[in-house]
Amino acid sequence: MDKEKLKTLGIFGGIFIITVYLTMAYVIKGKQVIVPNIKGIPVEEARKISVSKGLSLKEGTESFSENVPDGYVMVQDPMEGSYVKAGRTIYVTVSRGLKMVTVPDIREQNTRQAKILLSQSGLNIGITSKITTKDTPEGYIIAQNPPASALTKRNGAVNVLASSGEKEIFYVMPNLMGKKYETVRKSLYSVKLNVGNVSYKPVQGFDKGSVVNQYPLPGAMVKKNGVVDLTVNYAENEKQYRLISILYTVERGGLSVKRVRLVILDNDGSREIYNDMSRSGSTIEKSVRVSGSVILQVFINNEMKEERPYE
């Protein structure tokens, strides 16, 4: 066999070996495909795309997400662009959307407390509407939407209706000069006005115990529950003082916590002895130095509920 024939035989032999190798490699490895990008689309659409490429899809874990809608693919494995054998499974993480949380009850809370409660549940205060009312203190929540115990998306907003307090009412100040202090005090309280500072000054031409000066002056506008300062024709050293004990139990019903304000009225005028949020059924006790006849005024949520005389 000459050299030319041997050379030709060697070439064909090499081609045969390479062909056999490549054929075996293809059989062993199988067909290679490129993994498609299926993130950010509905899982069923991702499944169809995977099947069209000769791949299968399997849903693995689920996860809440603020950015990926419910039922959409968040993560895939293998990653897009990878070369894999045909028939390979793509594992995906599917979004469950925003996490749902239970709305807390923020009624009867002030806006600051309401914000704290909502924040602890992953929520925010939304639109705040206001209404005038005498039954709920200013700044306290009357109603909410969504309601308490409802399920809503995390980071969502709860709209509220809050109290702006009682509507302001004004009166024309009457002329009190020359009238007996006790009569003046009772008439002022009957129209929801309070005696403020009372000073005593002996003045000729006025009966003892009568009003000789007032502020605001006659004819001025004064707000409901406003304060009127008086000067009375009476010597300071003629007054006698005593110590009394004030006991008040907060009425039940309505709000569980109420704004309670206690005001004492005596010969020295009116003065506040208590002003705080108190629970229904709790008892308030105060010792007070007074002069003359005494009246206790009780205000609940800025509305006078009771006048109680003390001897």
Image: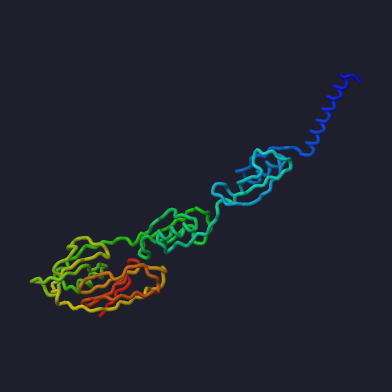
Quarter of the image where one finds residue 138: bottom left
Residue 4, by quadrant, is: top right
* Residue 178 sits in quarter: bottom left
Residue 151: percent from the left, percent from the top?
A: 53, 58
Figure check: 298 above or below 95: below
Give the quarter of the figure containing the N terminus. top right
Query: In the image shown, does 201 or 39 lie closer to the viewer?
Result: 39
Residue at image point 14% right, 72% down: 210
Q: Name the side, left or right, on which 256 lies relative to 100.
A: left
Q: Which of 142 and 190 is in front in this view?
A: 142
Q: How many marks?
A: 0
Q: Is residue 214 left or right of residue 205?
A: right
**Residue situated in front as seen by the camera: 257 or 38:** 38
Residue 53 location, x and y as percent? 70, 39
Q: Give the residue displayed 82% in from the left and 33% down from the top.
A: 20
Q: Which color scheme is applied?
A: rainbow
Residue 268 against residue 146 in the figure, above or below: below
Q: Is residue 150 left or right of residue 15?
A: left
Q: Residue furthest right?
A: 1
Residue 33 % position (x, y): 71, 37
Q: Assign the C terminus to one quadrant of the image.
A: bottom left
Residue placed farthest to the left in the image?
A: 204
Q: Position of residue 164 (x, y in %)?
A: 36, 59
Residue at screen point 44% across, 60% down = 143
